[in-house]
Image (cartoon, helix red, strand yellow):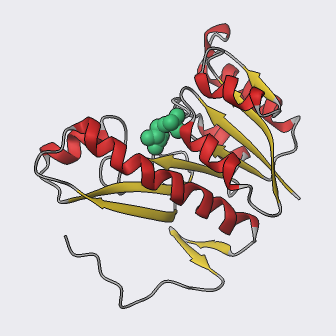
Amino acid sequence: MKNIVILISGRGSNMQALVQAAIPGAQVAAVISNRADAAGLAWAAAQGLATASLSHRDYPSREDYDAALMALIDTYAPDLVVLAGFMRILTPAFCRHYQGRLINIHPSLLPAFTGLDTHQRALEAGCRVAGCTVHFVTPELDCGPVIVQGAVPVLDHDTAATLAERVLAVEHQVLPQAVADFVSGSLSIRGNRVYRVENTVDATAQLII
Ligand code: GRF
């Protein structure tokens, strides 16, 4: 059984999707937040999951906070750490410590729109396709090897909020898929590309919008 530790900062809808996916061979060992009032933490506790909060405000530096966070996470012996709306930039030491077993979900089709306000920026750039990405985390923000991406059309009357809602529904599909692929041992990383042992993607499939 692979232990998964999920980090959140707020609502936690991706964490919920992951818990509800009940991936064979995986168990959610803990849900941890940097905010004690994160709504997702209460939901996880109500499911009977182990929860913890560790406020970054209690630490003098990012390095000190990340060291304490690593110590807390490691008490759960994680095989995989999932950043599911964890709104903190992580230190290189943290990323190195969990190299190859730390993944993040980001609400854009990376490498476009790293950072914040992704949907507004996609609208302003005139994109006709938007989406989300699950990727391995490296020290450079939102830049690690891509595991899964999901795309949605950008509609003429979209606002950042309507686009975010449509992308979020896809996030809830691709995050459990990426975790299931990791847990089954079917992913390997070479350079910046992630390979699957069995490539089930239809090479003739096209998404023309
Ligand atoms: C998601 O859009 C995720 O891609 C981004 O932060 C948001 C978190 O939403 N990193 P939720 O807390 O999972 O509902």
- Give left or right: position of 125 versus 97: left
Identify whether 132 is placed above or below 190: above
The location of residue 209, given as percent across then percent down, is: 19, 70
Query: Is 108 left, or right, of 141 in this rendering?
Result: left
| Residue at (44, 63) in percent of width and height | 149
Q: State the residue in front, 19 or 104.
A: 19
| The image quarter in which residue 154 lies | bottom left
Residue furthest to the bottom in view is 204
Q: Quadrant of the N terminus?
A: bottom right
Q: Quadrant of the rendered structure where residue 157 is?
A: top left
Q: Residue sitting at 69 percent across and 23 percent down?
A: 42
Name the residue nearer the viewer: 59 or 50: 50
Instruction: Say if 56 sits above or below 140 in the image.
Output: above
Is residue 206 rendered to the left or right of residue 203?
A: left
Residue at left 10%, top 51%? 156
Q: Is residue 60 left or right of residue 44?
A: left
* Closest to the observer, 193 or 131: 131
When the figure is inspected, residue 191 is found, relative to residue 169, above or below; the finding is: below
Q: How many numbered circles are shown? A: 0
- Provide residue 95's location: percent of width, then percent of height: 63, 44
Residue 141 seen anywhere in this rendered image of the structure: no
Decide if residue 90 is in sight here.
yes
On the image, the x and y values in percent for residue 140 come to 48, 46
Task: Give whichever of 50, 21 is nearer the camera.
Answer: 21
**Residue at image coords 69%, 75%:** 186
